[in-house]
Each structure stands twice: as C-alpha cells, then as structure tokens.
Image: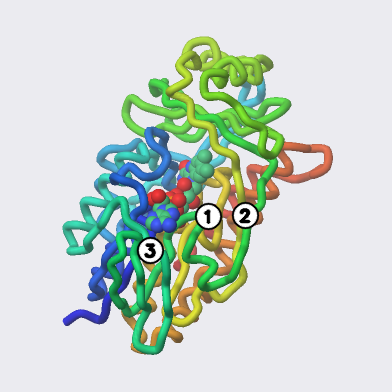
Amino acid sequence: MSRGSVLIVGGGIGGLSTAIALRNVGYDVNVVEIQEDLHSSVFGVGIIQPMNALRALDAIGCAQPCLDVGFAAPAWGRMLDVDGGFICDMPGTRVPGSDLPPMNGVTRPQLHKILTGKALEVGATIEYGKTFTELSDGPGGVEVVYIDGTRNTVDFVVGADGVYSKVRPYVLGEMKPVYLGQSAFRVNIPRLPEIDRIILQKGPEGMAGFVPIGPDLAYFFYNTTWAEGRWLEQADMPAVLREMLAPFGGMTAEVRDHHIDDPAGLVFRPEEWLIAPAPWHRGRIVLIGDAVHAVTPHLGQGAAQAIEDGIVLADALGKHDDHEAAFTEYTGRRYDRCKLIVETCVNIARWEMDPAAMEGYDNTAETQHVLEEMVQPI
Ligand SMILES: Cc1cc2nc3c(=O)[nH]c(=O)nc-3n(C[C@H](O)[C@H](O)[C@H](O)COP(=O)(O)OP(=O)(O)OC[C@H]3O[C@@H](n4cnc5c(N)ncnc54)[C@H](O)[C@@H]3O)c2cc1C
C-alpha cells in the first residue's frame, strides 16, 4: 500500500536519489525536470564521489554501478607545488566495516544514467521539460499547477531544484547564494597513470587539479580568483586559461601545452555558496540539496550531501506518520553536517585566494578532518 504521493521538483543528483529512496519506503513519486532530457546537469564533466557519497548510493543500490564505470582511488589525494614537486599526501578515509574506496570518480552523464535507470526501475516516474507555476499548501495536501496548465494534489513536495530553487521561496522566502570570489575551469583529459587519486597543484593565483573519472579518463580543473560577473566568451577561454596556467610546471604544464585548445571542451562555472537556516520545510513542502546548502567543489561533497539528504528524508518519512515530525527530524540530522561542509569550503577558498590573510590555515588537515566527520553515521 502506498504511504502517499510525492512530487519532486528537479531531476538532478539529489532529486533522483530522493526519488529512489522514497519509492523504497513506499511512496508514489513523480519527478518533474525542467530540462528536456536526463543529462540536465553539467554535461561531460566528472564528479568526485567521496566514501560517504558511495555509502549513501549503496543504500539505494547505485554504488556498485558507479564503481563499475568509474575509477576507484586507493586514497583521497596528493598535494604538489607549482612545479609539480611533492608536498604531502591526503590519505582520506574509509567507511568502517565497508569495502568502499576512499573516493570514486565518474562522469556526470554516467551518474545521471545510473540514477535515472534505478529511479525508473523502482517505479518512480520522470517528466522532462516540465515544471510547476504555483504551489498551494493546505491541510489535505499541496495543490500543484504545472506549466502546461494541468494540476493535481500531492501529499508532499520536495524542492530539489538546485541553487536557484523556485520551490525555496515557499519555505524560506527570498534568499540568494553568495558568490565565493572564485570560478573554475574544467576539461576532460586522458588519464595519466599518476592520476590515481585527486592530485592538487597549488599555484600563485589558484588551485589546479586532476580527478580520475574512469579507467582512461580524468578531468583537469583550475579554480581561481575571479571578479564577480566577469564575462568570458567561450571562444576566448583556451587562451585565457593557458595564460593563467603559465607559472605551472609538472602535469599542469602538460595539460596547458597539449589539452587546452578546443573551446567547446571547456566548462566554466562561477562558485556560489549558501546555507539556509533551519527548518528546511514549511507545511508539506521540504527542500533538499543545493536548494538549501549550495556547496563549492573544494571538498567534492556537494552531490554527496544532496544524496544523503534524500536517504535521511526517506528514512524519516518512512518512520513517522506525522510529516511535521519527519521533516523536523530530517533537518535536525542534516543541518550541522551540511553547515560544516559549506563553511570549510569557504575557508579553503579564502586560503587559496589570500594565504597571507589565513596564516596558519592547514588546508590538508581541514580536508582530512571533514572526511573523518563524513564517515560518521547519518
Ligand atoms: C564546478 C562544480 C563542480 C562540482 N564538483 C563536484 C564534485 O566533484 N563532487 C560533488 O559531490 N559535488 C560537486 N559539485 C556540487 C554538485 O554538483 C551539487 O552540489 C549537486 O549537483 C547538487 O545536487 P542537486 O540535485 O541539489 O542540484 P542540481 O544538481 O543543481 O539539480 C537540480 C535540478 O533541478 C532542475 N531544475 C532547476 N529548476 C527547476 C524547476 N523550476 N523545475 C524543475 N526542475 C528544475 C535542474 O535542471 C537540475 O536538473 C560541484 C559543483 C560545481 C559548481
């Protein structure tokens, strides 16, 4: 027997994970995704899956498929200097009692395919090219008006529609993410044997890095100080990036000299953060993922936290008949953890942008601390 009906707004990593987890505890689930097809997130770039992301994916039957297509790293990472010289290892950690690696890398399209396939397999429905125009929360459910003029009433609405969430104002009013002061370039490259974990290479103006995302594939990123709103034509990106990478030796110099020619292969993303105040629900409408905790990429934890949200939300809704109790438990179990991630990412970014102002800040120790916190039960 169904426990009730749920509309999930947003078919990204968090929305799809939540759909699977809610189906598994007996809810009827429909997902509306504004984009026209399943590759609705950043196309063609990889995603870091730390051990806690894999644990959460394991709970919805999606960890092994990610490990099958991705690259399981034996350790978290390594820090190199601007010339490519060794600075230190970043060991990371494992989930106690589990065989899951400290980190797996996959491409975003592969992850979307795995989550979408599982969501459909467990009986969720997904409607692409569709969104809502109005939500009216009442004691008997949430009345939803869709962009195509249709309407229905569901027991709950989950806002999983990302950092510029249109569901969020119904719960928290108007709220804007904060620009971090950094933006990132990304490009897929062939995986060199040395890229068997996250490799960071610290430059004078930003952090370069390498992430393995398949047996033969890796991505290169450069995360750098960038004025808010500074516009860059796609065609100009290779030359601008190559110039910014001029001080580097080692693997970053290799990438600069051989892999940054095609503007179409480069993805540029400004970085924004947000931690919404608790609670993350009002009435029958609840928020997950970037809609309430937009995370910058410094710890590779944004998707992990969105997936964990879905697992915890389904667990709480599966346990409580009273949705107010379920949603209160959900935010209670999630808030401090997500806040730690958001704040640590902001601090790492500040250190990268102005090390002198953050004298004594130990980026690798902070990363290790967060990873050890993340293996704690959710
Ligand atoms: C450059 C960059 C690199 C990153 N790298 C990593 C990484 O390596 N590892 C990691 O864990 N995290 C990473 N993150 C963070 C991660 O991408 C996000 O935290 C994660 O995708 C959040 O998932 P989400 O489902 O909440 O939101 P999203 O992935 O943004 O999904 C939201 C979905 O909702 C849809 N949508 C939006 N508005 C509407 C609407 N009105 N109606 C219907 N649908 C709508 C969107 O099309 C999208 O599909 C990175 C972020 C950036 C910016």
Q: Nearer the viewer, mark 1 or mark 3?
A: 3
Does the beta carbon of the residue at mark 3 sit less than 8 Å from ligand 1? Answer: yes
Answer few, some or many: residues within 10 Å of disc 2's Cα (few below 14, many 20 plus, some between 14 and 19).
some
Does the beta carbon of the residue at mark 1 sit less than 8 Å from ligand 1? Answer: yes
Q: Are marks 3 and 2 in contact (CB under 8 Å)?
A: no
Amino acid on which disc 2 is placed = Pro
Residue at label 3? 132
Q: Are marks 2 and 1 in contact (CB under 8 Å)?
A: yes
Residue at label 1? 164
**CA distance separating discs 1 and 3:** 14 Å
What's the coloring here?
rainbow
Q: Nearer the viewer, mark 3 or mark 2?
A: 3
Would you say 358 lies left or right of 3 here? right
Q: Nearer the viewer, residue 97 or 331?
A: 331
Circle 2 sits in a helix, a strand or a loop, which is it? loop
Circle 1 sits in a helix, a strand or a loop, which is it? loop
Amino acid on which disc 3 is placed = Phe
Residue at label 2? 177
